[in-house]
Amino acid sequence: MALVDLSGASWRKSSRSSDQPNCVEVAFAEQAVGVRDSKDATGPALVFPASSWRQALRRTS
């Protein structure tokens, strides 16, 4: 996957984990989804192709 710029992305976490300190956040870019540790907002993010993210969600629902 090509380099994805998530610097202007809007990060969010599940409403079910809003009061939990150990969470992950996701951000959606054009063709990618970023995932990061909510405790380390300036740290690294994993980036997945949007198609892979959709497939993973289908498998868990």
Image (cartoon, grey):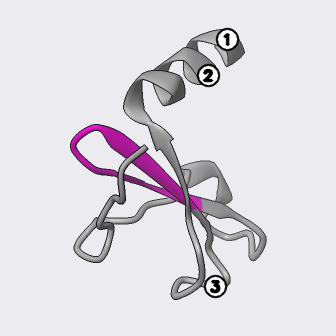
**Residue 56 numbered tag:** 2
Q: Nearer the viewer, residue 49 or 21?
A: 49
Give the residue pinned by disc 3. 40
- Residue at point 43%, 43% (across, down): 1
Name the residue: 64% across, 61% down.
24
Residue 45, quarter of the rendered image: bottom right
Residue 34 location in percent, x, y? 47, 55
Kindly check if marks 3 and 2 are in contact, taking CB atoms under 8 A apart as contact: no
Does the residue at mark 2 contact the one at mark 1 (Cβ under 8 Å)?
yes
Looking at the rendered structure, the kind of residue marked 1 is Arg
Alpha carbon of mark 2 to alpha carbon of mark 1: how far? 5 Å
Q: Disc 3 residue type?
A: Asp
For disc 1, the neighbor class at 10 Å (few under 14, some 14 to 19, many from 20) is few
Say the numbered circle drawn on residue 59.
Answer: 1
Measuring 36% from the left and 43% from the top, which residue is drawn there? 32
Q: Earlier in the sequence, mark 1 or mark 3?
A: 3
Above or below, 43 against 50 in this view is below
Which span of residues is magenta-colored?
A: 25-35
